[in-house]
Image (spheres, rainbow, N blue to C red):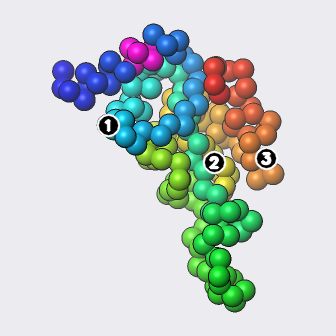
């Protein structure tokens, strides 16, 4: 077993010892900077802990896509209305398949870009997931519901701990 595989298996074991069970759906947002951990290794350990029947979900938010968000307002601060309009016109459209989840961290990007990942279509508060329930949880995400009952988060309440 390679060092990376041993690390992944050890972490998966520790997650199981902490109570994470096979078949569960788990929402994870983690800052791994300074831990020495590799995002893909953490992702794989989480997937191993929940097993083939489980689902790993991460926030894949893109707040800069809203012209009322603080992220967008910081980007256009100091621009004239004409400059801000030109900036907005040049912003790329949100595409769940390719738009990065800026500010959500390496784990979120590792899940979002993994083979088989599913992402909800909300342009500001999307989620990405891997696992058995990924398509079911992320298939509907109305524009009018960022994180409420009709969002992936709200629909999955009670379907596993933490998510």
Q: Position of residue 10 (x, y in %)?
A: 32, 18
Q: Position of residue 119 (x, y in %)?
A: 57, 45
Q: Considering only vertical position in the picture, is 18 above or below 136?
A: above
In front here: 50 or 16?
A: 16
Looking at the rendered structure, the number of numbered marks drawn on it comes to 3
Gap between marks 2 and 1, in whole Å? 27 Å
In front here: 151 or 20?
A: 20
Q: Which residues are magenta?
A: 12-16
Q: Position of residue 155 (x, y in %)?
A: 74, 31
Q: Going by the picture, which residue comes out furthest to the left?
A: 2
Q: Considering only vertical position in the picture, is 114 above or below 163?
A: below
Q: Residue at x 60, y 72 (%)?
A: 75
* Dot label at residue 12: none
Gap between marks 2 and 3, in whole Å? 11 Å
Gap between marks 3 and 1, in whole Å? 36 Å
As drawn, is 96 to the left or to the right of 84? left
* Dot label at residue 36: 1
Please say whether residue 162 is one of the residues in the magenta stretch: no
Q: Residue at x 44, y 26 (%)?
A: 46
In the rendered structure, which disc, 2 or 3, sits on the residue that comes first in sequence?
Answer: 2
In the rendered structure, which disc, 2 or 1, sits on the residue that comes first in sequence?
Answer: 1
- Classify mark 1: residues with Cα within 10 Å, few (<14), some (14-19) or many (20+): few
Residue beneath label 3, please? 145
Name the element at disc 3.
loop
Can residue 19 be seen from the camera position used here? yes
Residue beneath label 2, please? 126
């Amino acid at each position: 077993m390679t060092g990376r595989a041993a690390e992944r298996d050890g972490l998966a074991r520790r997650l199981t010892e902490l109570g994470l069970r096979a078949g569960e759906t788990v929402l994870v947002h983690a800052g791994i900077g300074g831990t020495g951990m590799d995002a893909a290794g953490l992702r794989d350990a989480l997937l191993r802990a929940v097993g083939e029947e489980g689902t790993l979900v991460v926030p894949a938010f893109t707040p800069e896509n809203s012209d009322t968000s603080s992220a967008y307002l910081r980007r256009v601060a100091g621009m004239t209305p004409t400059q801000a309009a030109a900036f907005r016109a040049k912003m790329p459209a949100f595409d769940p398949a390719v738009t990065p989840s800026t500010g959500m961290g390496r784990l979120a990007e590792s899940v979002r870009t993994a083979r088989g990942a599913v992402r909800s279509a909300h342009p500001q508060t999307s989620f990405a997931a891997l696992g058995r329930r990924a398509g079911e949880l992320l298939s509907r995400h109305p524009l009018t519901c960022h994180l409420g009952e009709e969002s992936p988060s709200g629909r999955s309440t009670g379907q596993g701990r933490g998510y």
